[in-house]
Amino acid sequence: KKNLLSALSTTGKKHDQSQSGVLDCLTSHANDNDISIQSILPSGTKAKGEAQEFSFKLIFSCDYHQLGRFVNSIESDALPIAVSSLDVSDTKGGASKLNVSLAGKAWIYPKAGR
């Protein structure tokens, strides 16, 4: 646990240990991968020991490679974020773009952000 808290405060891009910090992290990674998020639906938090589990859902369009880079980047971030479900469908008209609905969870450690 100490290693995780240390990593949260010293590695990667610095995002606040808060709901807004998680949303900033997600939008930053989307921008880095040329993805325009159409909708962000925060689902609230649940206490999990010292952490708060924050659930969210994102809706966006992108191509296959952008999706892979985006998922890899958010799951590799210093903020602990995991994808819990991913629904992908092709866009009508046969374009290379995909419609994506991604649900995930982030664990916020408020004391680590101080």
Image (tube, rainbow, N blue to C red):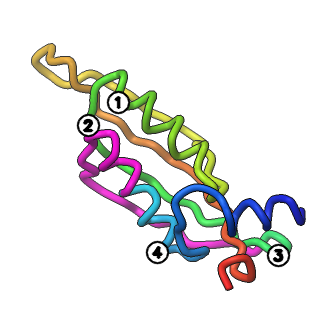
Residue for point 45% across, 28% down: 68
Report which residue position mark 2 lands on: 61
Q: Which mark sits nearer the N-terminus, 4 or 3?
A: 4
Calculate the distance from the C-alpha at mark 4 to the C-alpha at mark 3. 18 Å
In the rendered structure, which disc, 1 or 2, sits on the residue that comes first in sequence? 2
> In the rendering, which numbered label is found on residue 50?
3
Single out the mark in the foreground, 3 or 1.
Answer: 1
Callout 1 secondary element: helix
Q: Quadrant of residue 3?
A: bottom right
Q: Up-down: is 110 above or below 93?
A: below
Q: Amino acid at mark 3?
A: Glu
Q: Which region of the structure is painted magenta?
A: 28-47
Q: Which residue is mark 4?
A: 20
In the displayed orientation, state which residue is furthest to the right.
Answer: 1
Crowdedness near tag 3: few (<14), some (14–19) or many (≥20) residues, C-alpha within 10 Å: few
> Badge 4 local density, few (<14 within 10 Å), some, or many (20+)?
few
Residue 71 x, y percent position in the rendering: 49, 37
